[in-house]
Image: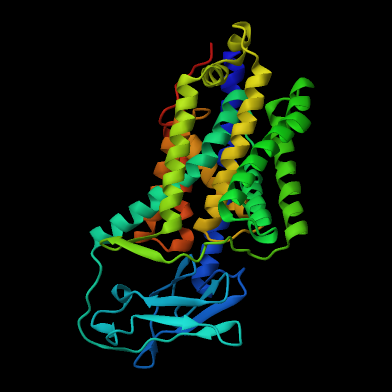
Amino acid sequence: MKVSRLTDARRWRIVALMFVVVLGALSLFAGANSARADEIGQEYDFVFTGNVKYNSEPLDGVLIKVSGNGYDAEVKTGEDGKWKIGVPEKGEYTVTLDESTLPQGVIVVEGQASVKAEFGLTSTKAVNFFLGEGVRTTTSFFDQLIERIVNGLNFGLMLALAAIGASLVFGTTGLSNFAHGEMVTFGAVMALTFGVFLKLPLIPAIIIAVIMGAVFGFVLDAGIWRPLRRKGLGTTQLLIVSIGLSLALRYGYQFFFGGSVFQLPGSSAEKIKLFGSVSLSVIDMISMGVSIVVLVAVAWWLLNTRIGKATRAVSDNPSLAAASGINVDNVVRVVWVISGALAALAGVLWAFFIPGVKWDMGAQMLLLVFASITLGGLGTAFGALVGSLIVGILVEVSTLWIPSDLKYLGALGVLILVLLLRPQGILGRKERIG
C-alpha cells in the first residue's frame, strides 16, 4: 500500500507540474500582451484611460494606480505613454501616479499626484497628470515592503481556507480535485444570491452560503465520488472526472449568472490608514480575523477531536486506519463537508478581496491552491496553511520588482522549485519504495 500511495503522490506532482508549466506559459504570454496593451481589468465595462507625457515626449513604464469602491489595480504606461484600467462599477475612484517611477528630475505638479475621478454619462473617463521639473519625495522601500507583507498575509490566510480543504480531500482519498476552484466560486455565488438577489442581510447571507457550501461538498461526495470509489476507479480516472466536473460547473455558473461581475454589499468600504503606508478596509480586517478564527478551529478539530484524529490517521494510511476499526467512508464524508464549507467561506472572502463575483473566479485561485498544497506538503493540512501564507506573502511582495499583472508567476516559480528540490514539501515526509 505504501508503494501505491507514493505512486499516487508522484502522479499528482507530475500532473501539477504539467498544469503549472502550461499556465505559466499562458501567463507569460498574457503578461507580454499586457505590456503592449497597457491595460488592466479588460473584463470590466467602465474604463479609466490616460496619456503620460513630458515636454511632448511619452513616458514609458510610469506606474498608475486606481483605488476605490473596494477595488485596487495598477498598470504601467506603454512606450506611447498610454495606460488603461478597467473598474467593476461606476463610482468615484482615486487615480494615483507613482512619482518614484518618473524619470529623474520629473515630478507631478504639487498636490496632483492623486486625483479623484468619476464617470459621467459615458463608460470611459480620461485622467491626465501635469508634469514638471523638481525634487520628489518617495515612499521608502521598507514602508512598501511592510504594506505588501500585510496585504500578503491577508491574502494568504484567505488562500489557506481553500487549500486546507483541498489538502484534506487529497490526503484521505488521493484525489487531486480540479473542481475545487468551482467549490470556491459556489460560496461566492450563494452569498450573491442570498445577499443581493434575495436581499438578505450580509451576515446571514454569508452564513447560509457557508452552510450551502458544506451541503454541496456532501452532495458531490455522495452523488459522484463515493460511487466512483466503490467502482474501483483509480486516481487518474478520478482526476479526469474532476476536470470535467470543473468545466461543467464553471460554465453552468456562466449560463445562470452570466459573464458580468457582481459586487457584494460592503465591497466599496474605504480603506483606513493604520500605520506607515499600510491601509486596510474594515472588510479586510474582518476577513483576516475570521480566517484566523476558522483556521485555529480547524487545527483544534484535527488535533483534539476523535473524528479529527481519525482524519489524520486516514490521511497517513487508509488501509491501516480501516484495519484499526475506523470507518473510512464516514471520515471521507466529513472531510468533503468541511472542505465544501471552507471553500465557500474562501469564496466569499475572495469576492471581497478581488473585489467582485464572477463565474470563473475560483479557477483564478486554483493554481495558487495547488502551489500552496505542494509547497507545504501533499495531504497535510498544516502544510497547506504554511504553504498558503508563504505563497500569499510572496505574491504580494513580488510586485516590488515585477508588474502586478505578473505577480502569480512568483508562485509558479516556487512550485516548480519545490517539485524539483524538495518534492515532499516543507512539512511533508520523505518516503521510499520497498
Color scheme of the displayed model: rainbow
- Position of 206 relative to 177 (above/below): below
Residue reaching furthest left? 135
Location of the N terminus by quadrant is: top right
Res 299 quadrant in image: top left
| Residue 257: image location, x then y, percent | 73, 59
| Residue 251: image location, x then y, percent | 74, 54
Disc tally is 0
- Left or right: 204 in relation to 221: left
Foreground residue among 240 and 336: 336
| Residue 210: image location, x then y, percent | 61, 43
Q: Residue at x 22, y 75 (%)?
A: 137
Q: Residue at x 23, y 64 (%)?
A: 140
Q: Residue at x 29, y 79 (%)?
A: 103
- Left or right: 115 in relation to 19: left
Task: Report if residue 432 is visible in the image.
Answer: yes
Q: Residue at x 58, y 77 (%)?
A: 46
Foreground residue among 151 and 284: 284
- Left or right: 214 in relation to 92: right
- Position of 386 relative to 266 (above/below): above
- Position of 56 relative to 118 (above/below): below
Foreground residue among 208 and 323: 208
| Residue 154: image location, x then y, percent | 41, 50
Task: Report if residue 24 is visible in the image.
Answer: no
